[in-house]
Every structure is written in structure tokens, then in C-alpha cells.
Image (spheres, grey):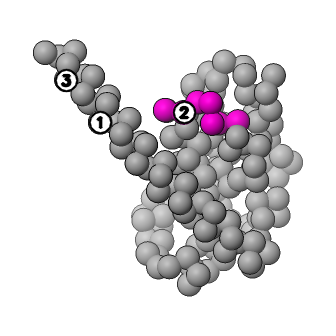
Amino acid sequence: MSIVLDIEMEDEYSKSVETLLVFLGDRRPKLFGALQAIKITAFDPPKLPSLSETPVAELFALPNKPIHSLSAEHLVRYAQIVDTALLKSYLIIRLSLVGSLCRLENWCEVAETEAVLRDRKVRTIYICQLLLDQRTVFCRVD
């Protein structure tokens, strides 16, 4: 009985992460389009405290508004949250997609993603290379 419950819970967990991937995959291009429109890139980010240094209450207080009405700071925060959550989700259920995200310009939070990559011991297939500004994560295949 316990094994059946564990399998069912794991299946529900996987389904919830799959649903999250659909949402994140929808948000990502919209956020990047809005950031490109105001000429903000992950290679030249505004100076903001990292997500891990930002109080959780401040993150929960981010406005729930249409993307086009968000400030530059809010767009960057949302991009960091979306890309970091996307990478973590890939590590949970779609390890093969980690490299594809890392090869793109992304807003993954280095402090969080580096630890997750190491915790998962991504089999030395992916080696994390941090850019000089420590903001964007790129991976290369060994």
C-alpha cells in the first residue's frame, strides 16, 4: 500500500512540475520580448541584489500586472524567477533540456542554480561556466 501511495504522489508531483513547465515556457518569451524592448539583457543587467539576498516578502509583493505595465526592475525579477524555476524544473523531470536553457541568454540566479547543479551531480555532462558578472549561467557539453 505504501509503495502505491509513493508512486501516486511521485506521479502527481511530476504532473505538477510538467504544468509549471508549460506556464514558465509561456512566460519566458514574453518577458524576454519586454526586456529587449527596453534594451535590457542578461549580459548587461541592472544592478539589483540577487534573488537569494532578497527577502521572500519582497518577492511575494511583486505586482500581478500585465507584462507591458511592469517596471524594468520588476521585469528583471520576473525573468530571474522564471529562468531559475525553469532550470530547477528541468533538473527534476527533463535533465536533457538543461543544456538547451544554459546555451541561451538567461536570467538564472547563479547563487541558486550553481548549488542545484552540484546537488544533482549533473554527471559531469554539463560544466557550469559563470560569466564574469556572475549573473548568467552557461553550460557546455563535455
In this rendering, position of residue 119 left or right of residue 100: left
Q: Secondary structure at mark 2?
A: loop
Observer-nearest of 27 and 88: 27
> Disc number at residue 94?
2
Relative vertical location of residue 135 with respect to residue 120 in this rendering, above or below: below
Q: Quadrant of residue 50?
A: bottom right
| Residue 128 percent across, percent down from the top left | 75, 33
| Residue 140 percent across, percent down from the top left | 80, 32
Observer-nearest of 47 and 89: 89
* Residue 68, visible in the rendered structure: yes
Observer-nearest of 71 and 39: 39
Q: Earlier in the sequence, mark 3 or mark 1?
A: 3
Residue drawn 50% across and 79% down? 66
Reply yes or no: does residue 58 show up in magenta: no
Residue that lies at the very extreme toward the bottom in this rendered image = 69
> Disc number at residue 139?
none
Residue drawn 79% across and 75% down? 39
Residue beneath disc 3: 5
Residue that lies at the very extreme toward the right in this rendered image = 132
| Crowding near the residue tagged with mark 3, few <14, some 14–19, many ≥20 C-alpha atoms within 10 Å | few
| Residue 127 percent across, percent down from the top left | 76, 28
* Residue 76, visible in the rendered structure: no
Q: CA distance from mark 3 to mark 1?
A: 10 Å
Q: Secondary structure at mark 3?
A: helix
Residues drawn in magenta = 93-99
Q: Quadrant of residue 8?
A: top left
The amino acid sitting under disc 1 is Glu
Q: Secondary structure at mark 1?
A: helix
Relative vertical location of residue 97 with respect to residue 79 in this rendering, above or below: above
The amino acid sitting under disc 2 is Arg
> Disc number at residue 12?
1
